[in-house]
Image (cartoon, rainbow, N blue to C red):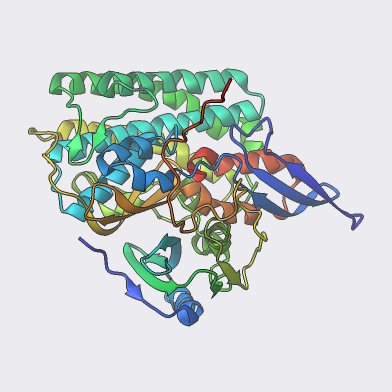
């Protein structure tokens, strides 16, 4: 070690970053001493539009906070309004929301696996992950009409129903998807090169994960069973839920959580399809929201929180969003300190940063 | 329907955060919102599924004690609130000095006398 420190800028444009974040890496030789993040390259100020759009229309804007977790944003927003107004959403609608939320989780995790493979130069693996993801997007398109932005959630329920016969066909198609995912995750969890780049890299202790505010697979990879689905929102209370937890705390553990959650989501979808109640998928909504509500859901990247404040008019008075990537920034800063410079891109990827979501 | 939010004094923020940390609660989020008079800053903590909210009411330009000594991850929320609303936090674990979120106008979420128009009308140039 020479003892001389240099600052290396990482991002906002970098081959492994699909979206812009900037890190000032303070390095001593090849070791990272500290990392200082900065964001704001794509901050859109969507939250401030809430007083200029009616709350029923704002569902479409909330959905556009993110292009990957879009469905969860719309359902979380609707859940907040429904909680504030005391609306009882029909069971079939909550089951459908659960199903679409889990399809979104699978497509997001497959997207991440593909991007991670690509970052290591595994292009065929990247194509394979995204090929499977296409099947998931096809299901979303067939049932909602949209591949990325579904536009299916509304205050009081959902806009579309899915026939029981089609649900049964979806269940059958999950068998093939599951087989393909088994082959895919086998590579991520057992390939020599991939595991070499993950095991022991970016270790986040359980205590740090808890008190630094880690969320989602970043927290669960460090042995914490933090998952908003534990609260039993939507249909999770009915069908039962236990989070996937890994204890390693390193990049491999975070990758393993995502791989295992793919199969957990398949199981949840199967349960939802089997237990799907009959009945309406929405109720009429009258009046305007008044009060405050913290609405929470589990996105693919972790817990998202929508704070909503109504004043009895058609427009909400306040809307604030806390996305999982924002709360995963302090753990990222912590795990980058002390790592090798060459490992930085992969370590950054293991928190699955979604900058567009964070910049809402 | 309203959620239970306990009001506290701004001077007690660090003490409350310290108590939460000792009690094994994690910091979930710090939310700043404009109020009729001044602003509300709400601190949310959780242990298992017990979610608790504590709120301070502050006037514009107030310096607020940071809870970074109890929760190292608070710096993202505190810097964000500084950059979007203009509040300063004393004792942050990482102070970006207003450069955490790069905004084209300073403190864009600060209360304005007139809200920005939804559609910007561009006057046609005279030929």
User: Which residue, as the protein is rendered here, is positioned at the far front?
Assistant: B127
As drawn, A196 above or below B64: above
Q: Nearer the viewer, residue A309 or A194?
A: A309
Kindly tell me whether residue B36 is visible in this rendering. yes
Q: Position of residue A309 (x, y in %)?
A: 31, 56
Count of marks overlaid on the render: 0
Q: Position of residue A102 (x, y in %)?
A: 33, 35
As drawn, A333 above or below A194: below
Residue A252 occupies quadrant: top right
As drawn, A322 above or below A267: below
Q: Position of residue A132 (x, y in %)?
A: 43, 20
Residue at point 72%, 41% (across, down): A10
Q: Quadrant of the N terminus of chain A?
A: bottom right
Q: Is residue A298 left or right of residue B21?
A: left
Q: Nearer the viewer, residue A165 or B76?
A: B76
Kindly tell me whether residue A233 is visible in this rendering. no
As drawn, A123 above or below A257: above
Residue at point 66%, 38% (across, down): A197
Q: Is residue B21 left or right of residue A165?
A: right
Residue at point 56%, 24% (across, down): B126
Residue B88 occupies quadrant: bottom right
User: Which residue, as the protein is rendered here, is positioned at the far right?
Assistant: A2
Q: Position of residue A57 (x, y in %)?
A: 28, 37
User: Which residue, as the protein is rendered here, is positioned at the far left?
Assistant: A279
Residue at point 50%, 55% (across, down): A214
């Amino acid at each position: 070690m020479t003892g001389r420190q240099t600052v290396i800028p990482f991002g906002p444009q970098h081959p492994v970053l699909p979206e812009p974040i900037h890190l000032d890496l303070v390095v001593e030789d090849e070791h990272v001493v500290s990392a200082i993040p900065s964001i704001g390259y794509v901050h859109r100020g969507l939250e401030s539009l809430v007083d200029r759009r009616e709350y029923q229309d704002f569902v479409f804007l909330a959905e556009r906070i993110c292009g990957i977790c879009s469905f969860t944003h719309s359902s979380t927003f609707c859940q907040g309004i429904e909680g504030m107004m005391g609306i009882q959403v029909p069971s079939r609608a909550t089951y459908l929301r659960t199903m679409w939320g889990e399809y979104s989780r699978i497509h997001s995790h497959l997207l991440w696996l593909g991007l991670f493979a690509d970052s290591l130069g595994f292009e065929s693996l990247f194509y394979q992950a995204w090929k499977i993801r296409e099947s998931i997007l096809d299901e979303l398109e067939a049932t909602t009409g949209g591949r990325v932005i579904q536009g299916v959630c509304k205050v009081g329920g959902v806009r579309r129903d899915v026939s029981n016969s089609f649900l049964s066909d979806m269940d059958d198609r999950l068998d093939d998807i599951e087989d393909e995912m088994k082959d895919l995750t086998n590579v991520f969890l057992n390939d020599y090169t991939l595991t070499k780049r993950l095991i022991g890299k970016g270790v986040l202790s359980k205590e740090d994960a808890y008190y630094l505010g880690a969320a989602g697979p970043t927290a669960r990879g460090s042995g914490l069973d933090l998952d908003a689905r534990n609260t039993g929102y939507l249909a999770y209370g009915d069908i039962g839920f236990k989070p996937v937890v890994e204890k390693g705390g390193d990049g491999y553990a975070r990758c393993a959580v995502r791989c295992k959650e793919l199969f957990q989501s398949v199981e949840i979808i199967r349960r939802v399809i089997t237990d799907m109640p009959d009945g309406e998928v929405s109720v009429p909504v009258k009046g305007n929201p008044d009060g405050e509500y913290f609405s929470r859901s589990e996105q693919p990247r972790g817990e998202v929180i929508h704070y909503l404040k109504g004043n009895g008019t058609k427009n909400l008075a306040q809307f604030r969003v806390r996305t999982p990537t924002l709360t995963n920034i302090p753990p990222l800063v912590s795990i980058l300190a002390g790592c090798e410079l060459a490992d930085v891109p992969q370590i950054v990827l293991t928190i699955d940063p979604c900058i567009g979501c964070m910049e809402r | 329907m309203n959620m239970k939010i306990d009001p506290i004094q701004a001077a007690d923020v660090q003490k409350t955060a310290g108590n939460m940390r000792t009690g094994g609660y994690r910091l979930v989020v710090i939310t700043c919102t404009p109020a009729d008079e001044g602003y509300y800053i709400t601190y949310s903590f959780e242990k298992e599924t017990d979610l608790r909210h504590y709120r301070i009411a502050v006037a514009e330009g107030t310096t607020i004690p940071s809870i970074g000594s109890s929760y190292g991850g608070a710096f993202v929320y505190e810097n964000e609130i500084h950059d979007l609303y203009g509040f300063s936090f004393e004792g942050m674990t990482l102070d970006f000095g207003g450069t955490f979120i790069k905004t084209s106008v300073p403190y864009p979420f600060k209360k304005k006398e007139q809200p920005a128009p939804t559609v910007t009308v561009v006057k046609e140039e005279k030929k």
